[in-house]
Amino acid sequence: MSLEDPFFVVKDEVAQSVSSVNALYGRWQQLFNDPQMRGNEEYEWSTNELRNQLRSIDWDLEDLDETISIVEKHPQKFQLDRNEVNQRKQFIANTRSTVREIRRQLNDAKSVAPSRSADGGARGAAAGSGGGGKGKGKGRGGGYDRYQKLDDELAAANDDMIGRQQQEQALIMEEQDDQLERVGKTVGVLKNIGQDIGRELEEQNVMLDEFDHEMDRTDSRLKTTLKKLDKVLEASKDKKQCCLIMVLILVLTILIIVYFTV
């Protein structure tokens, strides 16, 4: 097997990742099967961590697919027969099958999670007002005297006062209605602002998650590139040593020829 074979650069990482995922998946199943533990902080962390690790394995498997493509294009360089290539493809297929099964279990778990519902009520107010009337009538056998006139003036003054008070109360109620309407509009504006802020925060969280995932993928690819570079440097070092030995042998041969010639 050639030292430059890129397959084994990634395979060990995939095997370690699969082992870690299996251990975490076992713990996740324990939490999921316990109704009291399902939905707590550890369960949510395990679910998110499983999804992240499965995504990372998918990226590594893509790299393995690329290595197999390289090997198939240059079979003589890597000295691989068809059986070895098929074994590598089978390793990738088995790993993908494991990843799909765990991801399916995670997706199915969403439908088992308890649902919550909220009920609301309606409030209403009704007010009524009524008035009453007065009847006055005084009569004396002889007709109308000054006492009757005084009673009429007092009744008229009382009606005027009541009318003014009703008008003032109506104005006060209108002002209160206007104030309540303005307060309602202000609350509506604040509600819209709060919803906009919530949507902005959700978008920022999505962007942060994508950035985190991209950083993970970049880190994985960087590790792979560094391993490949180490192997290339080792091969280059061996070639330099061979060249140095050949030069030394050539110099030694020349000295021997000169010595015997003289």
Image (cartoon, rainbow, N blue to C red):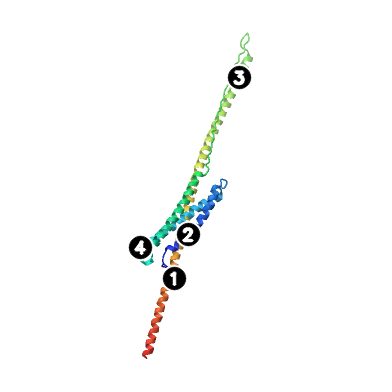
Structural distance between the alpha carbons of marks 1 and 4: 24 Å
Q: Which residue is mark 2?
A: 15
Pair 1/4: label in front: 4
Instruction: Say what secondary structure mark 1 lies in.
Output: helix
Q: Residue at x 52, y 37 (%)?
A: 184
- The disc, 2 or 4, on the residue closer to the chain's N-terminal end is 2
In the picture, the quarter occupied by the C terminus is bottom left
Rendering coords of residue 21 (x, y %): 50, 55
Left or right, 134 with respect to 220, comes to right
Q: Which residue is mark 3?
A: 155
- The disc, 2 or 1, on the residue closer to the chain's N-terminal end is 2
155 or 49, which is in the foreground?
A: 49
Q: Label 2 sits on what residue type? A: Ala
Q: Residues within 10 Å of mark 4 (few under 14, many from 20)?
A: few
Q: Which residue is mark 1?
A: 234
Q: Which residue is mark 4?
A: 73
Structural distance between the alpha carbons of marks 4 and 3: 114 Å
Q: Residues within 10 Å of mark 2 (few under 14, many from 20)?
A: some
31 or 116, which is in the foreground?
A: 31
Q: Residue at x 50, y 53 (%)?
A: 50
- The disc, 4 or 3, on the residue closer to the chain's N-terminal end is 4
